[in-house]
Amino acid sequence: MARVFNFSAGPAVLPEEVLAEAAAEMFDYKGTGMSVMEMSHRSKAYQQIIDEAEADLRDLMNIPDNYKVLFLQGGASQQFAMIPMNLMVNGVADYIVTGQWAKKAYQEAQKYGKANAVASSADKTFSYIPDCSDLPISEDADYVYICENNTIYGTKYHTLPNTKGKILVSDVSSCFLSEPVDVTKYGMIYGGVQKNIGPAGVVIAIIREDLIREDVLPCTPTMLQYKIHADNGSMYNTPPCYGIYICGKVFKWLKKMGGLEAMKAINEKKAKVLYDFLDSSKLFKGTVRKEDRSLMNVPFVTGNEELDAEFVKAATAAGFVNLKGHRTVGGMRASIYNAMPIEGVEKLVAFMKEFEASHT
């Protein structure tokens, strides 16, 4: 069967080049006579894989030496607890709630200290990013938390909030490596990789060294302490070896593509194809305030639930899969991550035009 155009929000499309390389190495990784899936994480061969992955990520993102890179498990959702457990030394944190995942992180933090929602876009179904230029930041806040790109609702912070000197913690799961980022603006930046980097099962956390402490909340399990993982080079226990290996291949692919500046230009071009059509369409319309649109996740509707369902069914039959919107919002959503070729977006738009012509 031919490859489909996979618009899934995650797990999501991976570069074909990476899949082909992994397939070629499945039975014998570089003369070891075994797959990376079978390899001891204590072996020299695997140590080289994880070391190279970290070095390439540092290179791509210009990560300063005073930041640790951790390859962890549990996905972004486990970080909702791990962050307050490790960073809430005063017992206070401020959250900006711009979607489902920021809301879940905020709710989880309430178990460990005083979590304040200092801004929210819930009043308009998270279809915009609130003004974050002058928020009521708590004087004793340990950090300010955001979800930078909202996968479900298709919004993105194009200006980071004014945290008034407090540490910024950002979940970048669905915009990870989609454009250049100044790591020094964050105390911690992290994301699950299954959207824009690799297979499900890995979360990458980039944390400033002074935030990696021993004086965590007393209830913090050993496995949920950043210091344990940092001191052991992400090898305190068996890491998600194969997932990290694939991430490493994606990092090399990104470098080959020209790095994050080049990816941003490609992503802007791709998104423009889809947004320009939505802005001119008589049938389909985007759901996000224009200035807050994501380059990665594009939600849209017809305004008629039955017609939405008909479109998703027809699109799937035509090889455009996973376009159904999240169950909490309905409609459609096209996730156009780094590995989605521009051809996929152009063909989707051509299909949407045909659908529109036959339904208006």
Image (tube, rainbow, N blue to C red):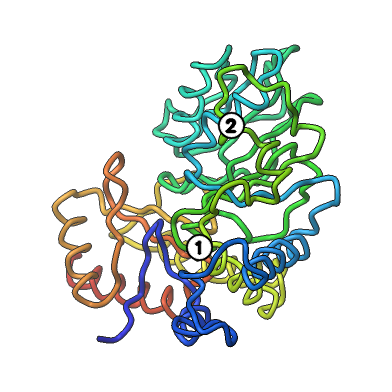
Residue 149 at x, y percent in the picture: 54, 46
**Depth order, front residue of 290/80:** 80
Residue 183 at x, y percent in the picture: 77, 48
Q: Earlier in the sequence, mark 2 or mark 1?
A: 2
Secondary structure category for the residue under label 1: helix
**Residue bearing mark 2:** 222
Q: Position of 42 compared to 33: left or right? A: right
**Depth order, front residue of 201/312:** 201
Is residue 130 in sight in this rendering? yes
* Quadrant of the image containing the N terminus: bottom left
Q: Is residue 94 above or below residue 341?
A: above
Q: Position of 159 compared to 223: left or right? A: right
* Quadrant of the image containing the C terminus: bottom left
Q: Position of 66 compared to 51: left or right? A: right
Residue in the picture at 29% in, 68% down: 321
Callout 2, which amino acid? Answer: Thr
Is residue 291 in sight in this rendering? no
